[in-house]
Amino acid sequence: MTKRKAAITALEALIALALAFAIVITVQTIAAYAQSRETPVYDKDGKYQGSVFDYGKTQTYTDRNGQFNGSAINNGNGTTSFYNRNGNFSGSAGSSIDRAFNFKK
């Protein structure tokens, strides 16, 4: 009877370890997906000029020193709003002037 109890206890421990491993892998996968993706930007001579960080609906831009340079936000309605390094609105783009400036709400 003792060997059987030890085998059951070992099996329970193995199942718990496998479950904990699965949870850790799932959390890391979700965290990796939520993080930004960095794309370096180079000029025509191959010199690094800065980076674009993609967060899904938002992209931020940095210069070669890593300083924030601006951002773009996908509004989800066919328009994108752009903001300068001070956070002030600097323009938008869309499929038509009406959608870009929301004249027909």
Image (cartoon, helix red, strand yellow):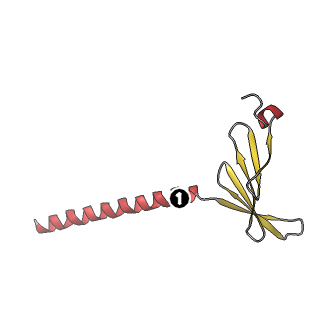
The relative height of residue 96 versus residue 19 in the rendered view (above or below) is above
State the residue lying farthest toward the top.
Answer: 104
Q: In this view, does 6 lie to the left or right of 76?
A: left
Residue drawn at the location 80% of the way across and 36% of the way down: 95
Q: In this rendering, would 17 be left or right of 27?
A: left
Residue 36, position as x, y percentages in the image: 63, 59
Pick the front one: 10 or 28: 28
Question: Is 58 located above or below residue 11 in the figure?
Answer: above
Q: Residue 28 at x, y = what percent?
A: 50, 61
Reading the image, the residue beneath label 1 is: 31
Tell which residue pokes out farthest to the right in this image: 45
- Tell me: residue 74, above or below residue 52: above
Q: In terms of image quadrants, where is residue 17?
A: bottom left
Residue 82: x %, y % from top left: 77, 49
Q: In which quarter of the image is the C terminus?
A: top right
Is the residue 103 above or below the residue 5 in the image?
above
